[in-house]
Image (tube, helix red, strand yellow):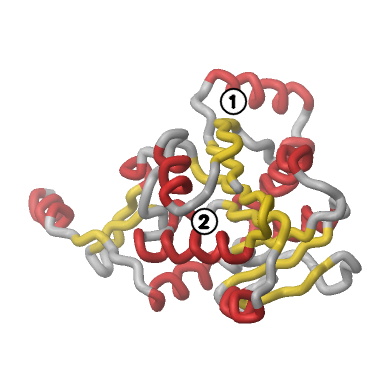
Amino acid sequence: MNGAQDNRLQSQSIVWDERLLQRFWSFYANQPETYFSFAKGADVVRRARGYLSPRNLILDYGCGPGFLLHELLKAGFSAGGADISVDVIGRNGPPLGSQKNLLGLFAIDDLLQEGRTFDAIFLIEVVEHLYDDALAATLRNCRALLRPGGRLFITTPNDELLEDSIVYCPVSNVTFHRWQHVRSWNSTTLPAALSNHGFTVDHVDTCTFRDHREFQMSLVRRTVRRVLDQLRKPKSLFVIAG
């Protein structure tokens, strides 16, 4: 036991690079039910709807499998999805190509080179995964892709204790966050970061987004779950900036 403890103390924290990120998310692409937007995308759209116009052109930035994009399209919005490569969009996600209001699926660099802009951009469960350089580049890209007067919608875990989700790999003797989170945000730090990157923050809220699978539960179980959610710290931070 002492030897195992010593080995654990000497472990290294993973520093995520492009190769590791690709390997990590390729694995979870085969488990779409683990994605936040799979479970809670519909409620994100519901909460954002009051800030949107039916005429808005919307971009889901970092859309991955496309679960949030699917909910935006289902709600009647004209929306497109963007990620680092078109090849990663929609993998094991909902069907997107048949939707008439789909603006397209894009590589982020292509949108920037073409000078495309949108009335609203959704950045859902992204900022907690980014080191400083990647965060700055992402917010700079969103600024460039957002039309004057447009809105940026961001969700991220609320004041997360990262250490609570650290796991250990005995094969490589490394530790890492279970969901590849590298930073924690709260209702003060995220608005400050957005302001530092040229955004004006319009709305900050803490909430617990509803999982669409709740409606498959019995009424009693669903009621108990919602009561417990009200007693706990809100799980998510919801910020709107322009």
**Residue at disc 1, secondary structure:** helix
Image quadrant in which you'd find residue 155: top right
Hey, what amino acid is under mark 1? Asp
The residue carrying pointer 1 sits among few (fewer than 14), some (14 to 19) or many (20 or more) residues within 10 Å by Cα, namely some
Hey, what amino acid is under mark 2? Val
The one of 31 and 120 positioned closer to us in this rendering:
120
In the image, is 94 to the left or to the right of 11? Answer: right
Image quadrant in which you'd find residue 35: bottom right
First-in-chain label (2 vs 1): 2
Q: What residue would you read off at disc 2?
A: 126
> Is 219 situated above or below 165?
above
Question: Which mark is drawn over residue 229?
Answer: 1
Residue 212 visible in the snapshot: no
In the image, is 116 to the left or to the right of 133? Answer: right
- Point out residue 123 in the picture as x, y percentages from the top left corner: 59, 55
In the image, is 223 to the left or to the right of 160? Answer: right
Q: Can you name the residue that lies furthest to the right here?
A: 100
Residue at position x 41%, y 49% in the image:
196
Q: Can you name the residue that lies furthest to the front here?
A: 148
Kindly report the distance in space between the C-alpha atoms of the residues bearing marks 2 and 1: 23 Å
Q: Nearer the viewer, mark 2 or mark 1?
A: 2
Across the whole image, how many numbered discs are drawn on residues?
A: 2
